[in-house]
């Protein structure tokens, strides 16, 4: 519990780590300056890119007592403004799921190699990062909990599968390795409430531990305070649920 007389400090910086195929990628790493040990969290950025918002999210987790890292999934596509790089990636059809998994695995390895890491690490993401979170929580050994925030295209029709996205995340449900938190907007179209219900039904059928919350009056990206989609009441409650979920499963 935070008290006003406790020591508080944080270090946040860009680092490099080994991602998919042994590639060197950059990442944003924030951690408390106390002795620890601390649990960790990997933050998977959204389709708008590896942007200022995700740096703020990463620092927010560090403030709450986590070793937090956000890998730049677009490292291989050149460097420039987050908007320009993201536009280039979108035009190319996004990053391959297999490459993303390798980059997130590298980020997990980075955190667990730290002497002040407890070894318990969560993974979370929003938008495309939410979809990626579901995949990583099913494919990667070593995570302790996962949080999917309005991840679109978890449910995918056969006609939407391709070389970069060969398997729908919902079809990986039997392989889900950790408890899953889901936060969704009732007015969202990607994922739509019927798609969220379909995902929940798959989790129930597979006997998985999960916790889903859908917020009426909120659409896609309702945490994004710098956009019209922001919904203050729902976002504050969502953050509280996110931190409570990770504290339950990872400690703090």
Image (cartoon, grey):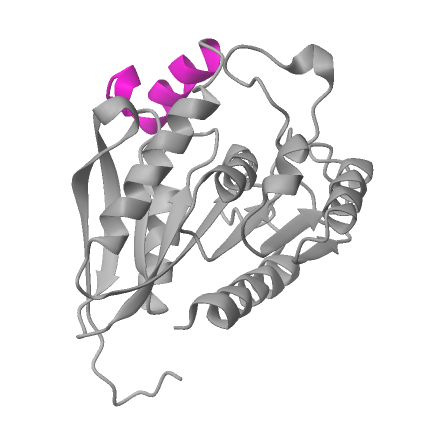
Q: Of helix, strand and loop, which mostly describes the magenta segment?
A: helix
Residue 16's x, y, as percent? Answer: 17, 37
* On screen, residue 148 above or below 48: below
Q: Quadrant of residue 211?
A: bottom right
* On screen, residue 97 above or below 29: above
Q: Does residue 199 belong to the magenta stretch?
A: no
Q: Quadrant of residue 30?
A: bottom left
Left or right for 1, reference 9: right
Left or right for 230, reference 51: right
In magenta, the rendered stretch is 75-91
Q: Can residue 168 be seen in this view?
A: yes
- Residue occupying the point 34% across, 39% down: 105
- Residue occupying the point 73% across, 41% down: 199
Quadrant showing the C terminus = bottom left
- Residue occupying the point 55% across, 19% down: 165
Q: Does residue 83 belong to the magenta stretch?
A: yes
- Residue occupying the point 20% across, 37% down: 17
Q: In which quarter of the image is residue 158?
A: top right
* On screen, residue 22 above or below 13: above
Residue 37's x, y, as percent? Answer: 25, 71
Q: Can residue 51 be seen in this view?
A: no
Residue 230's x, y, as percent? Answer: 59, 48
């Amino acid at each position: 519990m935070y008290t006003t007389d406790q020591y508080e400090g944080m270090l946040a910086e860009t680092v490099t780590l080994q991602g998919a195929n042994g590639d060197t990628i950059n990442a944003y790493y924030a951690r408390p300056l106390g002795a620890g040990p601390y649990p960790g969290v990997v933050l998977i950025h959204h389709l708008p890119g590896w942007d200022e918002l995700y740096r703020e999210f990463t620092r927010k987790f560090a403030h709450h007592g986590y070793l937090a890292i956000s890998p730049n999934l677009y490292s291989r596509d050149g460097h420039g403004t987050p908007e320009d790089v993201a536009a280039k990636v979108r035009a190319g059809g996004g990053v391959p799921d297999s490459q993303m998994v390798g980059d997130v695995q590298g980020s997990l390895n980075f955190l667990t190699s730290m002497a002040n890491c407890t070894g318990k690490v969560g993974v979370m993401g929003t938008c495309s990062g939410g979809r990626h979170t579901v995949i990583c929580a099913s494919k990667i050994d070593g995570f302790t909990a996962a949080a999917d925030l309005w991840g679109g295209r978890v449910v995918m029709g056969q006609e939407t599968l391709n070389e970069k996205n060969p398997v729908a995340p919902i079809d990986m449900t039997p392989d889900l390795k950790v408890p899953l938190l889901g936060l969704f907007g009732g007015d969202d179209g990607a994922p739509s409430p019927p798609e969220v219900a379909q995902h929940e039904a798959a989790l129930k059928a597979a006997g998985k531990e999960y916790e889903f919350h859908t917020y009426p009056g909120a659409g896609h990206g309702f945490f994004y305070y710098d956009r019209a989609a922001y919904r203050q009441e729902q976002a504050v409650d969502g953050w509280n649920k996110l931190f409570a979920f990770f504290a339950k499963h990872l400690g703090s």
